[in-house]
Image (cartoon, rainbow, N blue to C red):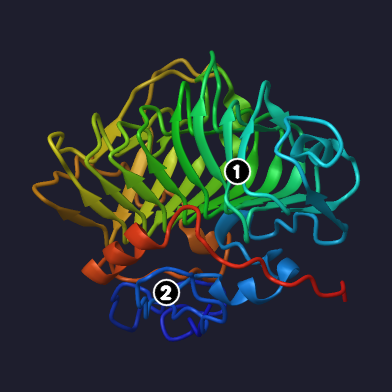
Amino acid sequence: MGNHHDRFSKHGHRNNNRPHPPPYYPTPEISNPIQNNLNMGLRLPYGHVDSSLRAIAGQAEGFGRFAIGGLNGAVYCVTTLADDGPGSLRAGCRKKEPLWVIFEVSGTIELSSYLNVSSYKTIDGRGQRIKLTGKGLRLKECEHVIICNLVFEGGRGHDVDGIQIKPNSKHIWIDRCSLSDYDDGLIDITRESTDITISRCHFANHDKTMLIGADSSHTSDRCMRVTIHHCFFDGTRQRHPRVRFGKVHLYNNYTRSWGIYAVCASVESQVYSQCNIYEAGQKKVAFKYYTEKAADKAVECTGCIKSEGDLFVSGTQSGLMPLPSETCVFHPSEYYDAWTVEAPTDDLKQFIQHCTGWQGISRPVDLPIS
């Protein structure tokens, strides 16, 4: 993640005796570049881990950085596109032991019901193109799950989300997934689920994109912590994300042409928005605040948003409200020492448009567990 000591101490705090340019951490050298027609001389966070199958475990940035998935388990090969049965994705995900799930087939898996993912699983779509449709994944009371390089499209039914994380799930990393056109949310994180990172995902053709904290009565959601970075919110209508209670770090995302708002802070939420690109379409205001009453409080309140280094283009109005105090929003360095963030430039914008979502990369080789 580069040497960050020129701007932060070993504990992640700024050296106040120096100027305060936007922090920048060079990305490691790319060992397995994406297979497309672009000559992308660009930074790929985690690109170096595509050289071997399990190297991705534990490489998330932010709150989900400890997720190891099925690092210490056997490789499970999905050999059929059937919804269930021997060799199916569902059969692998219900097993209780740690597994690293890979695919020997490409195509569409039509899910007739939510696919429950148990703890210590990696669902690794590198090397194939797997689309999940009909229903989505449910991460319920589980930990250490990595979901990488899948397509979620066309989920139907009441309360059907692409990826539903609830309740009490933790150490989750969702990376390089394309999500679109579900009847409810694309990713919902609720009911005390925490320590989650969403990175390099592409969200499109959707209304209620990402919800963090479902209801003002769920005061136990004060524990929730989520990092969202290098994601492309591509004309989706709202919730990029909408947050209740939790702490959310947003950095180097590109959000464009929303239909209602880009980011919404509601009851007691803390949103740290850093070096993102907000590009309005017809609706110009990026940040919204909704007032609600926590179940254990007498007075309604909203959340807080701190914006550092964000770029507002195409007539975008930030919509920021003054902070009640500088300490009302957490600083990410209170929780992790470094993260790959850079200034929001046209180069970053091009990178996010082309290098998010499902990628046509080769599946890395499986090396022995050391």
Residue 27 is situated, as x and y percent measured from the top left of the image, at 48, 78
Q: Residue furthest left?
A: 315
Residue 63 is situated, as x and y percent measured from the top left of the image, at 59, 54
The reply, left or right, for residue 185 in relation to residue 345 is right
Residue 56 seen: yes
The reply, left or right, for residue 369 in relation to residue 127 is right
Residue at (38, 33) in percent of width and height: 239
Residue 245 against residue 78 in the figure, above or below = above
Residue at (71, 30) in percent of width and height: 115
Decide which of 73, 314 is in the foreground and name it. Answer: 73
Q: Which amino acid does label 1 sit on?
A: Gly
Secondary structure category for the residue under label 1: strand
Report crowding for label 2: few under 14, some 14 to 19, many 20 or more residues within 10 A (C-alpha): some
Decide which of 64, 255 is in the foreground and name it. Answer: 255
Residue 147 is situated, as x and y percent measured from the top left of the image, at 64, 49
Secondary structure category for the residue under label 2: loop
Residue 234 against residue 60 in the figure, above or below = above
Residue 64 against residue 130 in the figure, above or below = below
- Nearer the observer: mark 1 or 2; the answer is 1
Residue 328 seen: no
Q: Which of marks 1 and 2 is nearer the N terminus?
A: 2
Q: Which amino acid does label 2 sit on?
A: Arg
Report crowding for label 1: few under 14, some 14 to 19, many 20 or more residues within 10 A (C-alpha): few
**Quarter holding residue 169:** top right
Residue at (40, 42) in percent of width and height: 203
Residue 37 is situated, as x and y percent measured from the top left of the image, at 37, 71
Q: Residue 14's mark?
A: 2
The reply, left or right, for residue 238 in relation to residue 61 is left
Residue at (27, 33) in percent of width and height: 288
Q: Residue 107's mark?
A: 1
